[in-house]
Amino acid sequence: MIKISRLFPLFLIPLLAACAIDSSKKEIAESSSTPFDAPPDWAKEVVWYQIFVERFRNGDPDNDPTPEDMEGAYPGFVPEGWKITPWTQDWFRPDDYFANMDGKQGIGGHPITGFDQKLQARRYGGDLQGVLDQMDYLQDLGVTAIYFNPLNDAPSLHKYDARHWRHIDRNFGPDPAKDRETMANEDPTDPNTWEFTEADKMFLKVIKEFHKRGIKVILDYSWNHTGHTFWAWKDVLEKQQASQYAEWYEVKKFDDPDTPENEFEFSGWAGVPDLPEIKKTQYMDHADGIRAYEGNLYSEEVKEHIFAITRRWMDPNGDGDPSDGVDGFRLDVAAEVPLGFWREYRKVVREVNPDALLLGEVWWEKWPETMIDPEPFLRGDIFDSNMNYRWYRAARHFFNEAPDELSVSAFVDSLEFFRANLREESNYAMMNLTASHDVPRTLTSLFNKTKNKYQAKPEDNPDYKIHKPDEATYQTLRLLLAQQFTYIGAPHIWAGDEMGMWGPDDPGNRKPLIWKDYEFEPETTHPLGADRPKDEVKFNDELFNYYRKLINLRKEYPVLIHGDIDFIHKDDGKKLLAYSRFDESREAIAIFNAGESTQTIELPIKTGSDYSEVLGGIIVERKENSLSIELPGRSAAILVSQ
């Protein structure tokens, strides 16, 4: 504590405080074991759990969204008769107010005709109190890192259309009315005027409670665009080129006040008019593919705004100790933002917390065929990790024979190819995911033999199956999960997959979670009016326990986290695959029989120890320098040296 004399020059107090904070940051940096160009060690050790708050749990009905909160969200108006949808309602049953949307136009001028369009008006009232209420559940499951979809204040259900980047959504906290007033009284350009809203304070409590449980927290942001209700964009719309934020956005042409027409043109992300894009030093038309490119954000002011928000959530009280802040960020549509900006961003983030994680959404080069090689983003100067959709597409292709059959050798070649040009520390930190808010739920993805995100819902493909998957799909899921949790990289769970939820691509992958203490209506409705089975909707204890077992195996046998990998058995004819995860003291062997018939497999071993099968209790026969195991069709086993 610095004692200040009454005669001490007051103008020096801020300088001394800054020096104290800088000193504190220096001490934290010196105590960190993470080099600037390396991922933090914790990134490869965690099991991720992704939370989409609006659909997680409604812990406080008093803060539910109102029509006022939704102004500006798609479809651009609040339908007559709108109200919160009951959490347990059949997802595909139309809300009463859906009929009041027929024949109207949504944002962008497109007529509202489809069920998926109408679903965008739904709200269920999920909030941060719901997250606080279920922390024991998450701890029991065993997850050790939370990835939050955007929490910034926004009118939509998904929150990628920010009204304010600097605040948590008003309806996620306990007092939306007070938070609206707090935000209105601030100067958005001056961080010195920013206060913590009631929702902000609740999020800080969420971070604190997760950290008490040893669970990391990262927050999703899109620095590529804002919503069209964002305060700076509204100023541009009103004042055109006279706005002080005119250079924040990718405006192609301003309105000429001397003509009756409105000539105003701008670039919206993926052509979406309610997501105006932040201006870059060079404009990139991604119509022919998305690729890494040099450059930066055009406006220094918008960069400083972004950096201030980043520091705010990493070190909320500004004392130089980031332990009360988020542990990193997931960066949305990262490949559409220039590399120069990301290099600056990494420096800002690592200056605040040297052990923070930066995880990119580097995904499609050209949808639906070509995925981006994330290598330019993973050299140590930009991101630490990436959402590993490439792994899932290959694994689904092999285990599910979707969209066609893939041999064992081709699957292994794909895995080796994905790793070949990346640094090993990046490979170990990759987020290996089977589903997310942007693709069908894992069970539904496996139930259909189509490409994973191509025509993956009834409105795009009337034959796409949306009902409860069959037992063969559950068998495939168990195979896939065994591979996910024994492979190099950090496994990820899209909230609800562990409960046994199913659902097609967005918006059907965003159903409210099926908690045990709720009684749900059965699913009987098809959005196209087609026949479908009547499906009971309830929590799947058996699947939950399988996820929990795989998580515990990673914790019990760290070789599954840190170990090297050696593909020791590949049999294309019998569809058998085995690989060894090993270090100096232990070996774990993951074995997969993707065929239909029982097979006897003999495998070489790297230690002289006895081995046990720890996944299903299958008997293992030890020979002199090998192991023999009889493995049923469509199943997996994990052998661990003792």
Image (tube, rainbow, N blue to C red):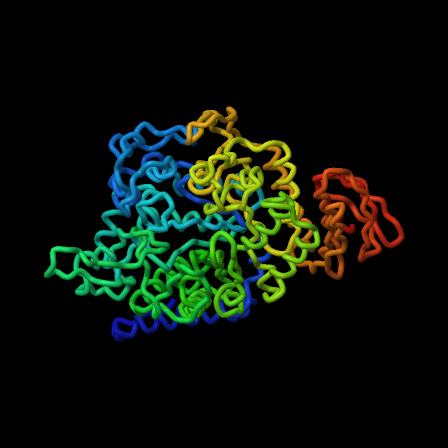
| x then y, percent, for residue 538 | 52, 29
Left or right of 339 in this view: 501? right
In the picture, the quarter occupied by the N terminus is bottom left
Left or right of 594 in this view: 253? left
Left or right of 511 in this view: 477? right
| x then y, percent, for residue 283 | 34, 66
Front position in the image: 360 or 128:
360
The furthest residue to the right = 624
Front position in the image: 53 or 258:
258
The furthest residue to the left = 258
What residue is rendered at 35% in x and 56% in y?
Answer: 269
What residue is rendered at 26% in x and 30% in y?
Answer: 81
Front position in the image: 108 or 201:
108
> Can the viewer see residue 24 in this picture?
no
Left or right of 17 in this view: 556? right
Is 603 placed above or below 81 here?
A: below
Residue 117: image quadrant is top left
> Can the viewer see residue 90 in this picture?
yes
| x then y, percent, for residue 437 | 46, 45
What is the count of numbered marks? 0
What residue is rendered at 20% in x and 62% in y?
Answer: 254
What residue is rendered at 17% in x and 56% in y?
Answer: 262
| x then y, percent, for residue 526 | 44, 29
